[in-house]
Amino acid sequence: MAKSRSETMLENRVKLIAAARKAFAQKGYSAASMDELTADAGLTRGALYHNFGDKRGLLAAVVDQMDTEMAARAQEIGARADDDWQGLLAEGAAYIEMALDPEVQRIVLLDGPAVLGDPSQWPSQNSCLQVTRSAVERLIAQGILKPVDAEAAARLLSGAALNAALWIAASENPQSVLPKAVEAFRSLASGLLLKPL
Amino acid sequence: MAKSRSETMLENRVKLIAAARKAFAQKGYSAASMDELTADAGLTRGALYHNFGDKRGLLAAVVDQMDTEMAARAQEIGARADDDWQGLLAEGAAYIEMALDPEVQRIVLLDGPAVLGDPSQWPSQNSCLQVTRSAVERLIAQGILKPVDAEAAARLLSGAALNAALWIAASENPQSVLPKAVEAFRSLASGLLLKPL
DNA sequence: TATCTCGCATACGGACCGTATGTCAAGTTT
DNA sequence: AAACTTGACATACGGTCCGTATGCGAGATA
């Protein structure tokens, strides 16, 4: 049977986002050509502007998708830990490892903030941040962490993890640097503990 | 007397960097037009490409200048503290406050990494990072901090400070958020202490 | 089945970047 | 000091890219 109109429209959006994700990751946002990108998806720029408004809108959609995936994964890993404190550490390590993916780095960590502005103002509301913030809030309520501002702690932790990943990725020997970064992250995070280890 | 050739060349470079700094800060790197920018400096694109190679080269020169200024200021503030530990905390707070400057944010924190790549690979070698790294090394040698990897600690600390600044700047009430961020930063940093407070 | 809707393709205009070429003053040589 | 050389900068051109305005044809509606 012939496909319904809303079906094909959704399929096209998926195709465009997938093609954009690949192009943005390989060439970077500004160097990615909308003509090539849409042709790669079997469409033209017409479809793109109709669905996403402009180039920024497309990037926002891609970032939203990736951010959501990352947050889900981090939350899952965190929930698997023995207690909430180990969960927070595991989440942090998970972010560091995820940020080693070149696709994540280029799109979410570099071009995303530069083009869309501060992550906390993204349409997706930055799910990653919310996940760690709620983890921090739980730990504060349990009396495990100092009563610092949860939002502040989450922002600084994610910032530290993010920068660790950029450092690792740029280093010549990522595998030897990763444990150093994770250990430093654990040290920093333990500064939030009410009762030092 | 007639100006020597190297004199005018240096003057022109200064003019171009100043104009670029203004344009990049106001419009962002990609939206800044080279024609407008050079005209604002009383020159043309010819001068620009002769001196800096391309648009990226100009951004690199601007970032280098700003990074150097920031590192000098942070070091000065850190040296003014009572001891090295307080110095490290003061440096961190200084970075957070400097990063509140829209010019710093747009050029050094957002467009810089997106266009030039990881800061540790910048031509300027990122003076800011080096300053905090040497501060961390001193404190480790003194037995005040845990023997973590100095580079890792410096990267994570600067990353945390950086992200704190982005958060503050994006918030509606920066003045009320700043102290929260600074306090969270001090908590995190104290996680590096060998003997908890 | 006839009409309407709208998602997408096509065509156009404007802007911008990087390079290739021209030009003229500052330095150099004789 | 006069002719010559160098090179810093201006000018002109080609190619690419983005965003919009217009056209079309397949699904939706009655």
Image (cartoon, coloured by chain):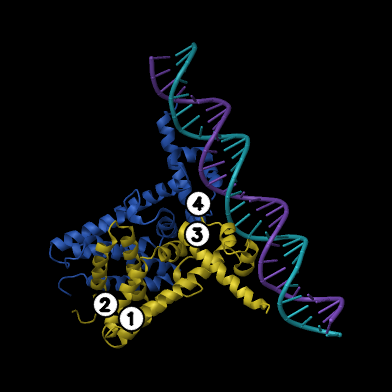
Chain colours: A blue, B yellow, C cyan, D purple
Measure the C-alpha gap from mark 3 to mark 2: 37 Å
**What residue is pinned by disc 3?**
B29
At which x and y percent is residue C15? 58, 50
Tell me the amino acid under the disc marked 2: Leu
- Badge 1 density bin: few <14, some 14–19, many ≥20, Cα 10 Å: many
**What residue is pinned by disc 1?**
B78
Quarter of the figure with residue A107:
bottom left
**Badge 3 vs badge 2, beta-carbon distance below 8 Å:** no
Tell me the amino acid under the disc marked 3: Tyr
Q: Which residue is drawn at 24% across and 58% down?
A: A133
Q: In this view, does D25 lie to the left or right of A150?
A: right
- Badge 3 density bin: few <14, some 14–19, many ≥20, Cα 10 Å: many
Q: Is residue A193 left or right of residue D13?
A: left
Q: Which label was assigned to residue B192?
A: 2
Measure the C-alpha gap from mark 1 to mark 3: 31 Å
- Discs 4/2, front: 2
Q: In this view, does A10 lie above or below A72?
A: above
Same chain shared by disc 4 and disc 3: no
- Discs 1/2, front: 1
Q: In this view, does B115 lie to the left or right of A137?
A: right
Measure the C-alpha gap from mark 1 to mark 2: 18 Å
Tell me the amino acid under the disc marked 4: Ala
**What residue is pinned by disc 4?**
A23
C21 or D3, nearer to the observer: D3
Measure the C-alpha gap from mark 4 to mark 1: 44 Å
Measure the C-alpha gap from mark 4 to mark 2: 41 Å
- Badge 2 density bin: few <14, some 14–19, many ≥20, Cα 10 Å: many
- Discs 4/3, front: 3
At which x and y percent is residue A103? 44, 57
The chain ID associated with circle 3 is: B
The image shows a total of numbered marks equal to 4
